[in-house]
Amino acid sequence: MSGNPILLVSPGREAERSTFHEWETSHVHGVHPVVYSETYRHSREPSDGAWGRRPMYLVTYQVRAEQEPAFTAWYESDYIPRLMADVPAYAACRRYASRSAEPTTYLTVYEIASLPEVDTALADMGAPWRTSQNLAWHHWEEAAVPYIEANVFRPIFSWPV
């Protein structure tokens, strides 16, 4: 880790640098940067561009290598387009694959249109009209996805524009 660049060059902050270095040395272990490349972008884009000040639903997962081509074909040509059609609160969707991690780790980022729509978006994902898609996801999860983690991130602060 490289630490806080402001702290490392600010004169008169030697004690803070020392404390930070001690903490970094004794508490930060096994941190490896992972570089991701975009592999898919849905055509729906927010009017203010990608990576706005919106909440995000992030899904991180790995796919068994022998299942990866079939999973990716289904995920990008069927699952994501249907999900985007069924969940209008999703303002954008992009999928990334790690370039440096083994096994490959995938990250799908769904931007949610606004903070009040977070619960609606998540509820729509599990709605009765999505039963066939959710069963298909469950099939693929059992057959091809040994690791998955999903998180919602809500913005807590934004600089004024």
Image (cartoon, helix red, strand yellow):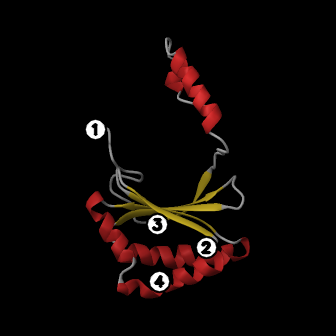
Q: Secondary structure at mark 3?
A: loop
Q: Tell me the distance, in whole angstroms, between the alpha carbons under discs 4 and 2.
A: 15 Å
Q: Secondary structure at mark 1?
A: loop
Q: Tell me the distance, in whole angstroms, between the alpha carbons under discs 1 and 4.
A: 40 Å
To which residue does mark 1 refer? 160
Which quadrant would the N terminus be assigned to in this image? Answer: top right
Residue sitting at x 59%, y 62%: 106
Closer to viewer: mark 4 or mark 2: 4
Which quadrant would the C terminus be assigned to in this image? Answer: top left
Disc 1: CA contacts within 10 A as few (<14), some (14-19) or many (>=20): few
To which residue does mark 4 refer? 133
Disc 4: CA contacts within 10 A as few (<14), some (14-19) or many (>=20): some
Q: Tell me the distance, in whole angstroms, between the alpha carbons under discs 1 and 3.
A: 28 Å
Q: Earlier in the sequence, mark 1 or mark 3?
A: 3
Q: Is residue 63 above or below residue 45?
A: below
To which residue does mark 2 refer? 72
Q: Earlier in the sequence, mark 1 or mark 4?
A: 4
Contact (Cβ within 8 Å) of mark 1 with mark 3: no
Q: Tell me the distance, in whole angstroms, between the alpha carbons under discs 2 and 1.
A: 39 Å
Closer to viewer: mark 4 or mark 3: 4
Q: Earlier in the sequence, mark 2 or mark 1?
A: 2
Amino acid found under the numbered disc labelled 3: His
Q: Position of residue 78 (x, y in %)?
A: 51, 79
Q: Secondary structure at mark 4?
A: helix
To which residue does mark 3 refer? 42
Q: Quadrant of residue 117?
A: bottom left
Amino acid found under the numbered disc labelled 2: Thr
Amino acid found under the numbered disc labelled 4: Gln
Residue sitting at x 57%, y 30%: 3
Q: Position of residue 26 (x, y in %)?
A: 64, 34
